[in-house]
Image: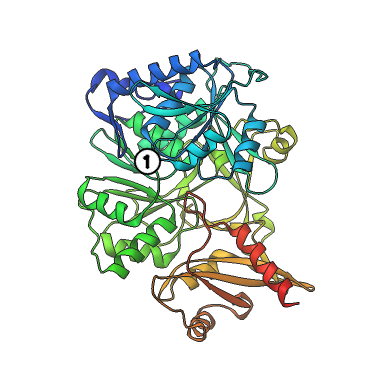
Amino acid sequence: MNHTVNQPGSPCRIHEAYLTWTASYPDKLALADSERRLSYQELEAAVEQAARKLEDAGVRAGDRVLLVAENSVALAVCILAVSRLQAWSATVNARLSAREIDNFLSHSGARVALYFSAGSPQAKAHGELRGAQSVEWPAIGTLMLGPVNQDAVTEPVEEDGARQVAAMVYTSGTTGAPKAVMLTHANLLFIGANNCRMRKLVPTDVIYGVLPLSHVYGLSALLVAALLGGASLYLVARYQPEALAHALANDGITVMHGAPAMYAKLLEWSESGGVALQAPALRVAQSGGAPLTMPLKQAFEKTFGLILQNGYGMTEASPSICQTRLDAPRSDCSVGQPIPGVEIKLHGADQSSEGVGELWVRGPNVMKGYYRAPDLTAETVTPDGWLRTGDLAREQDDGAIAIVGRSKELIIRSGFNVYPIEVEQVLNAYPDVVQSAVVGRTVEGNEEVIGFVERARDTDIDLESLYAHLKANLSPYKIPSEVIVLDQLPAAATGKVLKKELQQRAQQMLNEKA
């Protein structure tokens, strides 16, 4: 059954996403984790009970509620319960630092914070540090409830789901001031419905949910989409290749979403341990959140006999902008055409000899804005609704979009443009390279290309041989001045490599040599 947000009687709030299935398949499994399982009927009851508990704790319509957590059924229930009260949820990963949690509490003006301590020592520590008390809530178990912020001011409540904020997603906080993307109910329902349609979700589907619900990909394309489609979502707190391999082989997983790094580490785990990978029920494997490279796509497809689908988006677009189609398998690493219902244009492409421009998007997926940052919102979204993504792209002959990099990541070496993704594709094709990241480093009067590679377990990279491989596959100006081999690249909980951290490291290494 397909759902769109335009259908009569379709949900207007994210907590209404599952109501169709509560009525028609009450005993069907909705959410599960390693500790608990809820049917659709039990989910509805759990959301109502959690909403009452939140209301008793002082949460009002228009309040913000900070959820400090890793993926779990309890977290999903509370996100929906916050929606039920017309409040805004702001989920942040429990593995962040105390300073970052303090920044989010202050910036959001949260009425209360919930710390999901069951199974997360980090969430428990954050709760204890801030005077949270352990409570036992029906259907979801033990969590910690922080003190009420008596100074919290409510935001206006809008009847229109396109104006009422459902969730705030923090996109930065490790450096600088927090930046919170306000996503409306209509934003999240639009992307959830799109995912149902594009990936043909049905009640028999079992979705592996390791992408964090603190990230918009997990929130809209996994949680909301699963509930709209009547599927079962299995929530996983932390990515482990061995656990994923077991689930694919034994748990009937039909749909898998992951960042490229997750797939790369799964294949590396299999190869290094000599364990064959099996996924007898898998019908959709989706990559997103970071650029997909050809060596990884080919290795995955050879292993599983299944096309690795690709997509592109950003938090400010809830997040989907482009996706490959199931009925049109691709042999390249394009992110596919724009999803139905959104417009794109490549700003400045007409002035580029390569047809490269900044990708702009407009549609029901575009955020309401950044919380408490009207100037930043105005810089990012034009008066006529175009979201400036900051990503550089070119359009292929069939209308599919190829992402060549972020405008801020573009390296200009001796007057030539170097797009990191092209160099990463070549690095990733070298034996024993699990994944790579290419950044620019400022030198006197120029920029140079620096490559970081993550090697496979118990292997060594022969740099002389690697450079011969680079010279055979890249123009001279694209070849990294230095390649640094690491056991592991720094990454966010989504698996996305933290390039800013690597860039700072590269610059520091240069300064130390001076």
The location of residue 384, given as percent across then percent down, is 67, 33
Mark 1 Cα-neighbour bin, 10 Å: few <14, some 14–19, many ≥20: some
Q: Is residue 95 above or below residue 401?
A: above
Q: Which residue is mark 1?
A: 198
Q: Is residue 461 above or below residue 53?
A: below
Q: Residue at x 68, y 53 (%)?
A: 348
> Tag 1, which secondary structure?
helix
Q: Is residue 411 above or below residue 334?
A: below
Q: Residue at x 42, y 65 (%)?
A: 294
In the image: residue 380, left or right of residue 230: right
Considering the image in quadrants, where does the C terminus appear? bottom right
Q: Residue at x 56, y 22 (%)?
A: 164
Residue 65 visible within the image:
yes
Q: Residue 419 versus residue 502: which sits nearer the camera?
A: 502
Question: Three-letter amino acid code at disc 1?
Answer: Met
In the image: residue 407, left or right of residue 34: right
Considering the image in quadrants, where does the N terminus appear? top left
The location of residue 66, given as percent across then percent down, is 55, 30
Residue 325 visible within the image:
no
The location of residue 273, given as percent across then percent down, is 28, 68
